[in-house]
Structure formats: structure tokens, C-alpha cells
Amino acid sequence: MFLMRESPAELRLLVGALAHDLNNVLAGILGHAATLAAESGDPAPGAAAIQQAVERASSLTAQLLDLAGPEQRRSIPVDLDSIAREVAALVRDTTPASIRIELQLETGRGRVLGDPDQLHRMILNLALNARQAMPEGGALTLATRLGEGPRGPFVELAVCDTGHGIPESIRDRIFEPFFTTRGEENGSGLGLAIVHGIVRNHDGLIQVKSDPASGTTFLVRLPAAAGALTASAT
């Protein structure tokens, strides 16, 4: 089943206000930590730990703003194949040799209307999530194709891994903010929630297929830009 949820404007305003207030508090904490380090005269492990915690919290507030979705987004023709190649190159540099990265890009010149920065973040989050699902190695595949559905032409992105799969008992919760089974040290639990928000923000649909024997596939369908099917066939 493909999922799409509505995002009330009130949620965006609330999260934005909370993130702004939290950043003000964090700035104060960071200032006191800097004063503590200066007064100690020596490297202060406690102050350094406070600074690291504040920086992590600040990163989380930025992710919360991503989760709520921006008030506006750019809407220009975007080639998902190009972004997939960029993400593959980026992830490959920090991925162990036990995981091979494959590209199966078939859209030709198919385009979607959207924000390239958000779409890059969406694909990167899905790729990193897939990589984390394969601690023992495997294959990470990014694939695209053009299709026609009840809502019109679409560009489909598939991000596949050959990990242990997602248990059915938690599959309905994976897009919830802060939900994670990997421990705090391995992430904030916001990656897939942000992906869901970006897909929703682009009027798209997302589907998850997972099996313990064959891994997990995330399928994202985004409305194709006008003429995408015709252009890709020429």
C-alpha cells in the first residue's frame, strides 16, 4: 500500500516556533560552556562534552524543521537519475567494501517538478538507511523508471538493500519521528520521517516492501513533469 499523509500548517508553525526557542536556549548553554572552558585555563573535557551535545541538539532542531516541511519549496524540472548518481558517488566514498553500490537508472530524460535540494536529501537519507541495514555487507541499489498510474505519469525511485529486512511488527511505525531500533548512537530516528515529509511535500507516494530473506525496498513515486514520458522516449 502506498502512503500519503496531510501536514497541517499549524504543525509547521508549532515546530518552527519550538525550534527557534530551543536554538536560543542552546546558544545560551554554548556560551556558558565557552566561558567555563576559558576560565579553566586547561582543556575542559566537561565543556567539550557540553559543546558536542549542544551541536547535536542544534542538528536535531534543523531536522525537525525539515520534518515539518518548508513553507515554500522550489518547483523546477529535476532529473532524479542525476541526483541518484550524485548520492551514489557520495555514499560510495564512505561505504565499506563489503557493500557494493549499483545503479539501474532507466528514466532517460524523465523529470519531476520539485526542489532539487530536498530530493537530494530524500535519496541520501534512503541510501544511508539502506547502508545501515547491512552491517555484514550486501548490495545497495538505486533504480529509476517511468510509469503511468491512476494519478497520471510518474517517475519511480527504488532504493533497495539486501539486509535482514524490517519486521512486520514495526513496519507501520518506521516513518514516525524519533522511532528507531538502532540506538541513539546510530541516528536520531528522523531520517525516514524526513523522507516521508519530502515525498508528501512533492505530492508523491511511498511504499515499503521488506522480507527477511531478501532485504528491503523503498519505492517512491513522484508526479512526472509535463512531457516527461514523451521526452524520455525520443
Image: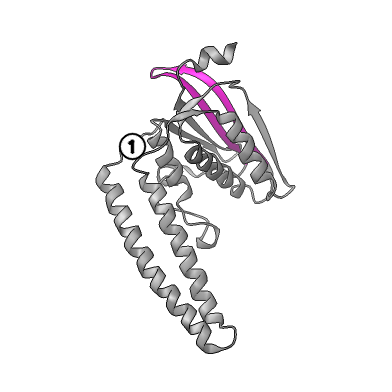
In the rendered structure, does residue 161 fall within the stretch colored magenta?
Answer: yes
* Residue located farthest toward the right when viewing the structure as drawn: 97
Residue type for callout 1: Arg
- Residue 164 image position (x, y, % from top left): 59, 45
The quarter of the picture where the N terminus appears is top left
The residue pinned by badge 1 equals: 5
Left or right, 181 with respect to 233, comes to: left
The quarter of the picture where the C terminus appears is top right
- Residue 120 image position (x, y, % from top left): 53, 40
**Going 38% across and 36% down the picture, which residue do you hit?**
201
Q: Which residues are magenta?
A: 139-162
Identify whether 31 is placed above or below 195.
Answer: below
- Residue 96 image position (x, y, % from top left): 71, 50
| SS label for mark 1 | loop
The residue lying toward the viewer, choosing from 115 and 92, is 115
**Going 49% across and 45% down the picture, which residue do you hit?**
167
